[in-house]
Amino acid sequence: MAGLFPTIAVEVELSGVGGGWTDLRAAGDVFKDAGIVIRHGIQGSAPTDRVAATGTASVALRNSTLNSGGVVGYYSPHHASVRSGWGLGIGFRIRMQDPDTTTWHTRFIGKLDAIDPVPGIYRERVVHLTAVDWMDEAARWKLTPEVGEQANQDWSAVLTAILAEMPVQPTASSFDSGTENYTFALDTSSFNTPALSEFVKLANSEFGLIYVTAAGTLTAEGRHVRMVDTAADWTLTDASYQDLELPSTRDDIINTVRVTTHPKIVDGVANQRVYAQANVITFAAAQSRDLIGPYRDETTGEPIGATDIQPLVAGVDYTANASADGSGTDVSSDFVVVVSAGASGVRFTVTNNNASTAHLTSLELTGKRVLEHGTATQEATYATCISSHGEHVVTFDMPYQEDEDVGQGAADYILAKYKDPLAQARSIRVLGKTTALLTQILTRDISDRITLSETVTGVSDDFYINGVELMLTTDGYLQADYILTPAQDPFAGNYFEIDTSALDGADVLAPF
């Protein structure tokens, strides 16, 4: 039986990023009775589920004299005897070694997000930990103007620009090139927009997927990847798993799809005022300040995007005076204004090089407005199915997609895939009760394709893994629960791939 129990390493970076990993489990500090639970990936099966949520891992540590430090409070962050280097935000990972192949697999990597010591001298004296993967960084970090204007870029280029400004990077990244370029992106965002919200907009616009793998690779998977992937990575039959969720409901049948695209209107000449300072700002001698503001339509006051921002001219685009009411000496030439223009707003770094206090009385930017006046909706519907099963409408927004043909292609594709009743397994549970099953559990990850067959339900089809939950049971077995989405494609096996397959009469181009 020993060959069915993976070796587990629960590791932390006590000496900072890159300072080496300390294995708490090997030291005997992990409280085994609490188990280990890891969750990551896309937490849904619908065609609208396209971006992963923040992944989590939970374990418990011994906080009594039975730990490796031999002291109570060794893992309590505010205790006098706290372990050196221990605290919130340190690196955390879980690795598992396959006893059959001896291969180590990283199954989670991130940082400590919560440390919860159980109080009371007569209680169990443990500390419950929660760690989060890199998607938490995307959920926390807000866009800045330094991401820059994103004009005529595909989704991978926009993702790369966002990532370049983020202070915490993923372990690695892998971005598929986008299927088309967007005339403008990020123009409808604000400085309070989390990067994760932008990931959703970009994934929807591409009809792609964004997630972090178990080993920490931020992945942007283009919309054609799963369309042309026809080979199963794992085949499971009745004897392979413990539970299967496969309800038949009308909600699984989609017979009306409405996709929204967003055409843009751009000024022909870069002479529109897109930013205007609303108040007088006082600067002491030699003082510098950062000023951040959104672009706004001068007439309506609504937030807008902007492009082709014009250089500032002292005394014209900005004015500084010795008096706050605009009177007195004009000292505009003593002010230096550095502009970081983004897609939807701007950061100014303003310095008063005058020897005295002065007042910035006006500051304006001109350029071309990027406007979104109305949207376009493309619809695909199946009247026969509506008559038989009742209408089920799904709406899908592609925020940076202007091409109505792409929107119609997305609507047609979703309809073709979901308009007929299908065996839609939502989740499956597998226990590593054989060496082969354990190896598969340790190997499988988001977007792997699996084949399922089951006698009683009659399911016999392929599915993709969208989300993963791993649990180390108290008796040492590794259990996996997978969130699944249908792999069946209305044109499976007939797509023509450039430089890969020969074109014949059965081949079809991707629908969008």
Image (cartoon, rainbow, N blue to C red):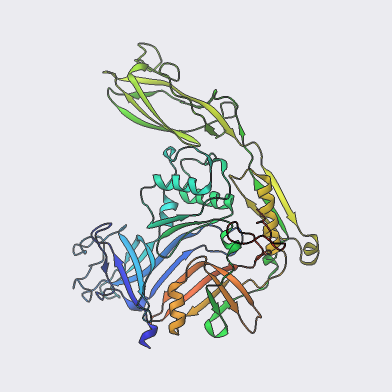
Q: Quadrant of residue 115?
A: bottom left
Q: Quadrant of residue 454?
A: bottom right
Total residue callouts: 0
395 to the left or right of 472: right
Say which residue appears at 59% left-offset and 68% top-offset.
230
Vertical placement of residue 270 versus 93, above or below: above
User: x, y percentage for residue 491?
Assistant: 68, 63
Q: Quadrant of the N terminus?
A: bottom left
User: x, y percentage for residue 256?
Assistant: 73, 57
- Given residues 313 and 487, the one toward you in this image is 487
Vertical placement of residue 148 versus 488, above or below: above
- Given residues 268 and 121, the one toward you in this image is 268
User: x, y percentage for residue 319?
Assistant: 41, 18
Say which residue appears at 52% left-offset and 48% top-offset.
155
| Residue furthest out toward the top | 328
Q: In which quarter of the image is residue 47?
A: bottom right
Vertical placement of residue 89 versus 438, above or below: above
User: x, y percentage for residue 285?
Assistant: 27, 22
Say which residue appears at 80% left-offset and 60% top-offset.
383
| Residue furthest out toward the bottom | 1
Say which residue appears at 67% left-offset and 66% top-offset.
252
